[in-house]
């Protein structure tokens, strides 16, 4: 599918991976609508920036309406995500507060934005939905690396599997490809926020760069594949590869 002049929506694009996705799609000729709760999104070059919260229905509707006014939609990147430690023995009230904080963005936001965009993609004759996940959901290569005090973040990303799997199947006849990008450590403010003073520790090794993952996203879309989780691991080439993926099936 030629993405030239198609509209691409990227959530959580003020920094990190979202900024890289937006820039790469713009360089491919897309008209990019990048949104974020952080107003810095309005200063990104080469894209239309908009302040909006993916966890708020009225904001999502405003984003999709604005995108529709920019032309034919072709790409949705569900990138906005939030991460925090949620130990299983925290207080009951804390657990419920954390649930809303994480799930409203990482799952409900993806649900609302995708449901609102799908009719436009169907009308346009197809397109791509990219769900930004994590390598934790690829246990064959990531066994044991899921931090045990991040149950809610982990659950939210495993929840994405349900969306990717069901939507890929349901939307196949509409030529809408739905995939998950499941990466290990990428140098973004989210990753740096885990360490004192934002300094990445040497033992982390050479982490991946957001631009690497953005390139992998383009490769994935060009491949025409759908219904897959594609991994990216520190120390390995960031590519979808030619071999069948470890997880040909996301569920089942
Ligand atoms: N960096 C990594 O190593 C890594 C690894 C695996 C997965 N991921 C995933 O990649 C995605 C991007 O992560 P990142 O590292 O760039 O994070 P980041 O925190 O640096 O950037 C996330 C962006 O999302 C925005 N955002 C948060 N809540 C929002 C909301 N309600 N509405 C709109 N925007 C919102 C933030 O303001 C921020 O600009 C996330 O889904 C994350 O879970 C990151």
Image (cartoon, rainbow, N blue to C red):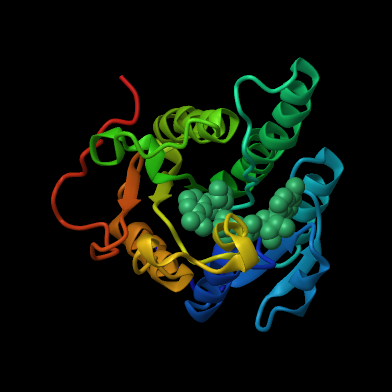
Q: Could you say where residue 27 lies in the image, as x and y percent from the top left? A: 51, 80
Ligand 1 image position (quadrant): bottom right
Task: Reply above or below: 187 against 75.
Answer: below
Q: Quadrant of residue 236?
A: bottom left
Residue furthest left as drawn: 243
Q: Quadrant of the C terminus?
A: top left
Q: Position of residue 199 (x, y in %)?
A: 55, 69
Circle count: 0
Foreground residue, 203 or 23? Answer: 203
- Which residue is drawn at the image coordinates 77% and 54% (left, top)? 63
The residue at the far right in this view is 58
Left or right? Give the position of 77 relative to 216.
right
Say whether residue 27 is left or right of residue 114: left
Q: Is residue 206 visible?
A: yes
Image position, residue 181 (x, y; %): 41, 50
Residue visible at 26% across and 63% down in the picture: 235
Q: Is residue 6 above or below residue 227?
A: below
Say if residue 11 shows up in the picture.
no
On screen, residue 224 versus residue 169, left or right, reads left
Q: Quadrant of residue 56?
A: top right
Where, quadrant-wise, is the N terminus in this rendering?
bottom left
Residue at the farthest bottom position = 45
Asked if residue 248 is positioned above or below residue 236 in the image, the reply reads above
Q: Is residue 47 left or right of residue 244?
A: right
């Amino acid at each position: 599918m030629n993405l030239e002049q198609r509209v691409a929506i990227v959530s959580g694009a003020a920094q990190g991976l979202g900024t890289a996705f937006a820039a790469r799609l713009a360089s491919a000729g897309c008209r990019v609508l990048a949104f974020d709760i952080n107003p810095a999104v309005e200063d990104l070059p080469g894209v239309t920036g908009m302040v909006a919260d993916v966890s708020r229905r009225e904001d999502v509707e405003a984003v999709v309406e604005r995108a529709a006014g920019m032309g034919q939609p072709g790409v949705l990147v569900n990138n906005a995500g939030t991460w925090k430690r949620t130990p299983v023995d925290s207080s009951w009230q804390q657990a419920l507060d954390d649930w809303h904080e994480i799930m409203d963005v990482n799952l409900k936001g993806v649900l609302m934005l995708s449901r609102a965009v799908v009719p436009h993609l169907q009308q346009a004759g197809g397109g791509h939905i990219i769900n930004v996940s994590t390598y934790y959901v690829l246990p064959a290569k990531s066994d044991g690396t899921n931090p045990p005090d991040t149950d809610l973040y982990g659950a939210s990303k495993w929840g994405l599997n349900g969306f990717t799997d069901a939507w890929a199947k349901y939307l196949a006849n509409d030529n809408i490809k739905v995939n998950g990008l499941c990466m290990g450590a990428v140098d973004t403010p989210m990753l740096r926020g885990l360490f004192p003073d934002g300094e990445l520790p040497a033992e982390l090794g050479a982490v991946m760069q957001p631009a690497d993952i953005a390139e992998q996203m383009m490769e994935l879309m060009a491949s025409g594949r759908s219904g897959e989780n594609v991994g990216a691991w520190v120390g390995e080439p960031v590519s979808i590869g030619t071999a069948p993926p470890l997880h040909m099936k996301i569920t089942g």
